[in-house]
Amino acid sequence: MLALTAASCGGTQQSPSAAPFSIAATATMTPAATDHATPGPTSAVRLAHPGRPYTGAAILAAMRGSTRPGGVPADLETRAVAAAVAERVWSWDGQPWERISAGGACGPSTCTLELAGAPAGGAGADLYLFEVDPGSGRVTSEATDLHGHPGELERQLDALARDLLPQGRLEGMALASARWLPPPDTDRYWLAYRSGGEEGARAVDVLLDAAAGEIVEVRDG
């Protein structure tokens, strides 16, 4: 959905490459009591070092250089909005993404701004969705869908989750995706397990604290 352009903290360079980004629909799940097993070792899990990699000037350059159809509305291309967005955007390792894309739209009273980026060697892309009041310049974080962690990390998280949960809890299920949470929830991940792609397949979502070596929550759906 969003075309990606190369960017760094100091600015943005256009690239003809494109890749789709979307916020995954949230399934309705009933929280279940968390099952705990004896915690396993966490030394094999690479811990995150999140940081805010962009200045307001870099975000403004990304908005002005957007190659997405329709681009970013001019009402959003201000230093104040860009600075507020930069304060709310984190990357898993504190480094700028290899590719970044921005897009937005305005309604009668408010606007939405999407910012997405993918790091080199990442499992996927990070997506941030903001609501902006163009009159006051107020920026509110609406949603995140963050997959810009290292690709090999998902194998480590899967192994740790299976070690922590009771034996057989995830039998016949595969890790479909993992998303990381920004500060203050550093090193917490939602792991989505699925038994298959057919309708009615088992679904288990696990909130894992990789630093503490703990299962925080389990949801069956």
Image: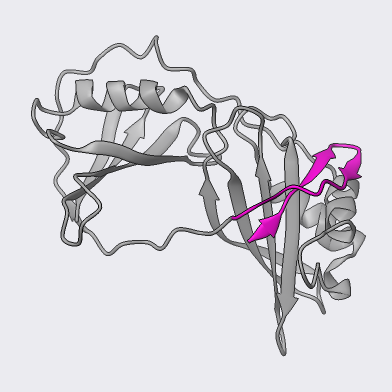
Q: Nearer the viewer, residue 120 or 39?
A: 120
Is 112 situated left or right of 72 in this image?
left
Q: Nearer the viewer, residue 163 or 119?
A: 119
Of the 4 image quadrants, the one containing the N terminus is bottom right
Which residue: 50% across, 33% down? 186
Is 218 situated left or right of 177 in this image?
left
Of the 4 image quadrants, the one containing the C terminus is bottom left
Give the colour scheme shown. Answer: one colour
Where is residue 76? Give x, y as percent: 83, 69
Q: Nearer the viewer, residue 69 or 166?
A: 69
Where is residue 39? Give x, y as percent: 22, 18
Region rendered in magenta: 1-20
In this view, 7 is above or below 130: above
Which residue: 59% across, 45% down? 126
Q: Please identify the quarter of the rendering in which residue 117 is found.
A: top right
Residue 181 included in the magenta stretch of the image: no
| Residue found farthest to the front | 16
Residue 8 included in the magenta stretch of the image: yes
Number of marks in the rendered image: 0
In this view, 16 is above or below 34: below
Q: Please identify the quarter of the rendering in which residue 90 is found.
A: top right
In this view, 10 is above or below 162: below
Which residue: 21% across, 57% down? 198
Q: Please identify the quarter of the rendering in which residue 206 is found.
A: top left
Where is residue 178? Give x, y as percent: 41, 39
Is 186 situated left or right of 30 in this image?
right
Where is residue 197? Give x, y as percent: 25, 52
| Residue found farthest to the bottom | 108
